[in-house]
Protein backbone atom coordinates (compact mmCIF):
# COMPACT_ATOMS: atom_id res chain seq x y z
CA UNK A 1 0.00 0.00 0.00
CA UNK A 2 1.23 3.42 -0.99
CA UNK A 3 2.35 5.54 1.96
CA UNK A 4 0.20 8.48 1.01
CA UNK A 5 -2.84 6.26 0.83
CA UNK A 6 -1.97 4.73 4.17
CA UNK A 7 -1.90 8.22 5.67
CA UNK A 8 -5.27 9.10 4.15
CA UNK A 9 -6.83 5.95 5.53
CA UNK A 10 -5.39 6.47 8.98
CA UNK A 11 -6.62 10.04 8.94
CA UNK A 12 -10.06 8.96 7.72
CA UNK A 13 -10.31 6.47 10.57
CA UNK A 14 -9.37 9.06 13.19
CA UNK A 15 -11.73 11.69 11.79
CA UNK A 16 -14.61 9.22 11.85
CA UNK A 17 -13.68 8.21 15.38
CA UNK A 18 -13.87 11.82 16.51
CA UNK A 19 -17.15 12.68 14.80
CA UNK A 20 -19.70 13.77 17.37
CA UNK A 21 -22.91 12.37 15.93
CA UNK A 22 -23.51 10.97 12.48
CA UNK A 23 -20.69 10.34 10.04
CA UNK A 24 -21.42 9.01 6.57
CA UNK A 25 -18.31 7.92 4.68
CA UNK A 26 -18.38 7.37 0.95
CA UNK A 27 -15.66 4.74 0.76
CA UNK A 28 -13.24 4.43 -2.08
CA UNK A 29 -14.61 1.96 -4.63
CA UNK A 30 -13.23 -1.52 -4.32
CA UNK A 31 -12.90 -4.17 -1.66
CA UNK A 32 -9.25 -3.62 -0.84
CA UNK A 33 -10.08 -0.34 0.86
CA UNK A 34 -12.23 -1.99 3.47
CA UNK A 35 -9.32 -2.32 5.82
CA UNK A 36 -9.06 -2.15 9.58
CA UNK A 37 -7.43 1.27 9.46
CA UNK A 38 -10.33 2.83 7.64
CA UNK A 39 -13.32 1.20 9.23
CA UNK A 40 -12.20 0.36 12.74
CA UNK A 41 -14.28 3.21 14.15
CA UNK A 42 -17.31 2.54 11.99
CA UNK A 43 -20.35 0.84 13.51
CA UNK A 44 -22.37 0.34 10.34
CA UNK A 45 -21.28 -0.86 6.91
CA UNK A 46 -23.69 -0.57 4.00
CA UNK A 47 -22.65 -2.76 1.09
CA UNK A 48 -24.21 -1.29 -2.05
CA UNK A 49 -24.79 -3.89 -4.75
CA UNK A 50 -26.50 -4.30 -8.04
CA UNK A 51 -28.86 -7.16 -8.81
CA UNK A 52 -26.61 -9.31 -10.91
CA UNK A 53 -24.57 -12.27 -9.88
CA UNK A 54 -21.05 -10.84 -9.87
CA UNK A 55 -22.09 -7.79 -7.91
CA UNK A 56 -23.94 -9.91 -5.37
CA UNK A 57 -20.88 -12.16 -5.04
CA UNK A 58 -18.76 -9.07 -4.34
CA UNK A 59 -21.31 -8.01 -1.77
CA UNK A 60 -21.08 -11.34 -0.03
CA UNK A 61 -17.32 -10.77 0.30
CA UNK A 62 -17.80 -7.23 1.60
CA UNK A 63 -20.17 -8.56 4.26
CA UNK A 64 -17.74 -11.31 5.18
CA UNK A 65 -14.83 -8.86 5.44
CA UNK A 66 -16.79 -6.33 7.45
CA UNK A 67 -17.87 -9.03 9.88
CA UNK A 68 -14.27 -10.21 10.21
CA UNK A 69 -13.30 -6.64 11.06
CA UNK A 70 -15.84 -6.74 13.86
CA UNK A 71 -18.28 -4.15 12.49
CA UNK A 72 -21.44 -4.30 14.60
CA UNK A 73 -23.98 -3.76 11.85
CA UNK A 74 -23.32 -4.95 8.31
CA UNK A 75 -26.21 -4.45 5.89
CA UNK A 76 -26.79 -5.04 2.21
CA UNK A 77 -28.47 -2.45 0.00
CA UNK A 78 -29.35 -3.57 -3.51
CA UNK A 79 -29.64 -0.71 -5.99
CA UNK A 80 -31.08 -0.41 -9.51
CA UNK A 81 -33.63 -3.20 -9.07
CA UNK A 82 -35.75 -3.30 -12.20
CA UNK A 83 -38.48 -5.86 -11.73
CA UNK A 84 -39.88 -8.84 -9.85
CA UNK A 85 -37.35 -11.15 -11.47
CA UNK A 86 -34.48 -9.03 -10.09
CA UNK A 87 -36.18 -8.89 -6.74
CA UNK A 88 -36.77 -12.63 -6.62
CA UNK A 89 -33.17 -13.43 -7.61
CA UNK A 90 -31.61 -11.10 -5.04
CA UNK A 91 -33.96 -12.26 -2.29
CA UNK A 92 -32.94 -15.82 -2.99
CA UNK A 93 -29.23 -14.98 -3.14
CA UNK A 94 -29.35 -13.08 0.15
CA UNK A 95 -31.33 -15.84 1.83
CA UNK A 96 -28.99 -18.58 0.64
CA UNK A 97 -25.86 -16.66 1.62
CA UNK A 98 -27.16 -15.30 4.88
CA UNK A 99 -26.87 -11.67 3.76
CA UNK A 100 -28.86 -9.12 5.76
CA UNK A 101 -30.88 -7.29 3.08
CA UNK A 102 -31.77 -3.87 4.49
CA UNK A 103 -33.02 -1.98 1.45
CA UNK A 104 -34.02 -2.50 -2.15
CA UNK A 105 -33.73 0.63 -4.24
CA UNK A 106 -35.65 0.56 -7.50
CA UNK A 107 -34.03 1.39 -10.82
CA UNK A 108 -34.94 5.04 -11.19
CA UNK A 109 -34.34 7.31 -14.21
CA UNK A 110 -34.31 10.27 -11.81
CA UNK A 111 -30.89 9.17 -10.55
CA UNK A 112 -29.37 9.44 -14.02
CA UNK A 113 -31.16 12.73 -14.67
CA UNK A 114 -29.79 14.21 -11.44
CA UNK A 115 -26.33 12.98 -12.36
CA UNK A 116 -26.57 14.49 -15.82
CA UNK A 117 -27.60 17.81 -14.32
CA UNK A 118 -24.69 17.56 -11.91
CA UNK A 119 -26.86 17.94 -8.86
CA UNK A 120 -28.34 16.06 -5.96
CA UNK A 121 -31.04 13.45 -6.39
CA UNK A 122 -32.89 14.86 -3.39
CA UNK A 123 -33.15 18.33 -4.96
CA UNK A 124 -33.85 17.06 -8.44
CA UNK A 125 -36.60 14.59 -7.54
CA UNK A 126 -37.56 14.63 -3.86
CA UNK A 127 -40.48 12.30 -4.47
CA UNK A 128 -38.57 9.81 -6.62
CA UNK A 129 -39.04 6.11 -5.81
CA UNK A 130 -35.31 5.78 -5.13
CA UNK A 131 -35.48 8.60 -2.57
CA UNK A 132 -38.43 6.87 -0.92
CA UNK A 133 -36.39 3.69 -0.53
CA UNK A 134 -33.43 5.61 0.92
CA UNK A 135 -35.78 7.43 3.32
CA UNK A 136 -36.99 4.06 4.60
CA UNK A 137 -33.38 2.98 5.04
CA UNK A 138 -32.65 6.15 7.03
CA UNK A 139 -35.62 5.39 9.31
CA UNK A 140 -34.38 1.88 9.77
CA UNK A 141 -30.86 3.01 10.67
CA UNK A 142 -32.06 5.57 13.18
CA UNK A 143 -34.72 3.28 14.58
CA UNK A 144 -32.07 0.68 15.21
CA UNK A 145 -33.85 -2.11 13.39
CA UNK A 146 -31.34 -4.73 12.35
CA UNK A 147 -29.55 -4.45 15.66
CA UNK A 148 -28.54 -1.35 17.54
CA UNK A 149 -25.14 -0.08 16.65
CA UNK A 150 -22.63 -0.64 19.39
CA UNK A 151 -21.24 2.42 21.11
CA UNK A 152 -17.96 3.27 19.43
CA UNK B 1 -23.71 6.46 14.25
CA UNK B 2 -20.71 5.98 11.96
CA UNK B 3 -21.69 4.61 8.58
CA UNK B 4 -19.34 3.42 5.84
CA UNK B 5 -20.91 3.08 2.41
CA UNK B 6 -18.98 0.52 0.38
CA UNK B 7 -19.43 -0.76 -3.13
CA UNK B 8 -18.03 -0.92 -6.61
CA UNK B 9 -17.76 2.15 -8.80
CA UNK B 10 -21.05 2.69 -10.56
CA UNK B 11 -23.09 0.87 -7.92
CA UNK B 12 -24.66 4.13 -6.82
CA UNK B 13 -22.91 4.25 -3.48
CA UNK B 14 -22.14 7.98 -3.71
CA UNK B 15 -25.74 8.89 -4.49
CA UNK B 16 -26.84 6.69 -1.61
CA UNK B 17 -24.30 8.18 0.81
CA UNK B 18 -25.28 11.75 -0.12
CA UNK B 19 -29.03 11.20 0.01
CA UNK B 20 -28.83 9.25 3.24
CA UNK B 21 -26.64 11.92 4.80
CA UNK B 22 -29.06 14.71 3.97
CA UNK B 23 -32.10 12.73 5.11
CA UNK B 24 -30.40 11.99 8.45
CA UNK B 25 -29.50 15.67 8.78
CA UNK B 26 -33.17 16.56 8.24
CA UNK B 27 -33.95 14.46 11.27
CA UNK B 28 -31.93 16.95 13.26
CA UNK B 29 -28.72 14.96 13.54
CA UNK B 30 -25.47 16.81 12.87
CA UNK B 31 -24.06 14.95 9.89
CA UNK B 32 -20.46 14.85 8.74
CA UNK B 33 -20.21 13.52 5.20
CA UNK B 34 -16.75 12.23 4.38
CA UNK B 35 -15.66 11.67 0.82
CA UNK B 36 -13.09 8.91 1.00
CA UNK B 37 -13.15 8.21 -2.71
CA UNK B 38 -10.16 9.09 -4.83
CA UNK B 39 -12.61 10.37 -7.42
CA UNK B 40 -14.49 12.81 -5.20
CA UNK B 41 -18.12 13.26 -6.18
CA UNK B 42 -19.90 13.28 -2.86
CA UNK B 43 -20.09 17.08 -2.77
CA UNK B 44 -21.86 17.25 -6.11
CA UNK B 45 -24.27 14.49 -5.08
CA UNK B 46 -24.98 16.46 -1.90
CA UNK B 47 -26.01 19.39 -4.07
CA UNK B 48 -22.89 21.55 -4.08
CA UNK B 49 -21.95 23.21 -7.38
CA UNK B 50 -19.34 21.17 -9.25
CA UNK B 51 -17.76 24.40 -10.48
CA UNK B 52 -16.80 25.27 -6.90
CA UNK B 53 -15.12 21.94 -6.15
CA UNK B 54 -11.69 23.30 -6.99
CA UNK B 55 -12.03 25.95 -4.28
CA UNK B 56 -12.91 23.50 -1.48
CA UNK B 57 -10.29 23.40 1.26
CA UNK B 58 -7.45 20.94 1.16
CA UNK B 59 -6.76 18.87 4.25
CA UNK B 60 -3.25 19.55 5.53
CA UNK B 61 -1.01 16.54 5.73
CA UNK B 62 0.00 17.12 9.32
CA UNK B 63 -3.46 16.48 10.79
CA UNK B 64 -2.28 13.07 11.85
CA UNK B 65 0.53 13.21 14.36
CA UNK B 66 2.59 10.15 15.12
CA UNK B 67 3.91 9.57 18.60
CA UNK B 68 5.43 6.81 20.67
CA UNK B 69 3.77 5.76 23.92
CA UNK B 70 5.91 5.14 27.05
CA UNK B 71 5.67 1.39 26.41
CA UNK B 72 7.15 1.88 22.95
CA UNK B 73 3.92 1.44 21.00
CA UNK B 74 3.69 3.79 18.05
CA UNK B 75 0.38 5.53 17.72
CA UNK B 76 -1.22 8.22 15.62
CA UNK B 77 -3.72 10.81 16.70
CA UNK B 78 -5.41 13.88 15.29
CA UNK B 79 -3.63 17.14 15.93
CA UNK B 80 -7.06 18.80 16.44
CA UNK B 81 -10.55 17.46 17.18
CA UNK B 82 -12.77 16.28 14.33
CA UNK B 83 -15.20 19.14 15.02
CA UNK B 84 -12.40 21.65 14.44
CA UNK B 85 -11.27 19.85 11.29
CA UNK B 86 -14.86 19.93 10.02
CA UNK B 87 -15.19 23.62 10.86
CA UNK B 88 -11.88 24.66 9.32
CA UNK B 89 -11.62 22.37 6.32
CA UNK B 90 -15.20 21.27 5.75
CA UNK B 91 -17.66 22.66 3.25
CA UNK B 92 -21.23 23.59 4.21
CA UNK B 93 -23.66 21.44 2.20
CA UNK B 94 -27.48 21.55 2.04
CA UNK B 95 -29.55 20.53 5.10
CA UNK B 96 -26.65 21.41 7.38
CA UNK B 97 -24.43 18.54 6.27
CA UNK B 98 -20.71 19.23 6.62
CA UNK B 99 -18.54 17.77 3.86
CA UNK B 100 -14.91 16.72 4.19
CA UNK B 101 -13.02 15.61 1.12
CA UNK B 102 -10.23 13.18 1.96
CA UNK B 103 -8.93 12.60 -1.53
CA UNK B 104 -7.34 16.01 -1.57
CA UNK B 105 -4.76 14.89 0.96
CA UNK B 106 -3.62 12.19 -1.43
CA UNK B 107 -3.40 14.70 -4.24
CA UNK B 108 -1.30 17.02 -2.14
CA UNK B 109 1.04 14.18 -1.23
CA UNK B 110 1.27 12.68 -4.67
CA UNK B 111 1.74 16.00 -6.47
Image (spheres, rainbow, N blue to C red):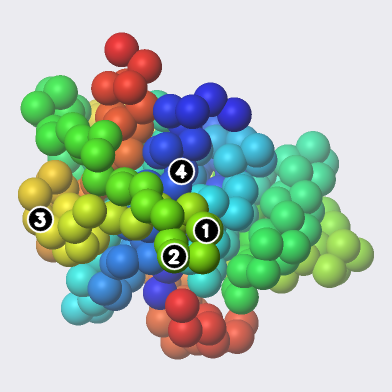
The residues tagged by marks 2 and 3 sit, at their Cα atoms, a distance apart of 32 Å
Looking at the image, which residue is at 60% across and 54% down?
A36
Chain letter for mark 2: B
Residue depth check, mark 2 versus mark 4: number of the one nearer the observer: 2
State how far apart marks 3 and 1 are (Cα): 31 Å
Q: Secondary structure at mark 2?
A: loop
Q: Mark 4 and mark 1, same subunit?
A: no
A22 is higher (above) or lower (below) than B77: below
Label 2 to label 4: alpha-carbon separation: 25 Å
As drawn, B9 above or below B78: above
Residue at x-position 38% and y-position 65%: A17
Q: To which residue does mark 4 refer?
A: A9
Distance of label 4 from label 1 (alpha carbons): 19 Å
- Closer to the eye: label 1 or 2: 2
Residue B70, numbered circle: 2
Nearest the eye: A34 or A111: A34
Q: Please give left or right for residue A15 compared with residue B6 in the image.
A: left
Front of the two marks 4 and 3? 4
Residue that mark 3 sits on: B87
Amino acid sequence: MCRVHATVRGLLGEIVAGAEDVAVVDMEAGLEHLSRGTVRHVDTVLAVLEPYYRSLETGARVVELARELGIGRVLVVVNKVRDDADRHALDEFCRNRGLPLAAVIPHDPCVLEADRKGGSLLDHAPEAPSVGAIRELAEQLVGGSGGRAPVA
Amino acid sequence: MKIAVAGKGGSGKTTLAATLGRLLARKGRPVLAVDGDSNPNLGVCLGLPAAEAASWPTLPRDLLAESTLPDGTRTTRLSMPTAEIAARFGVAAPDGVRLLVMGRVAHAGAG
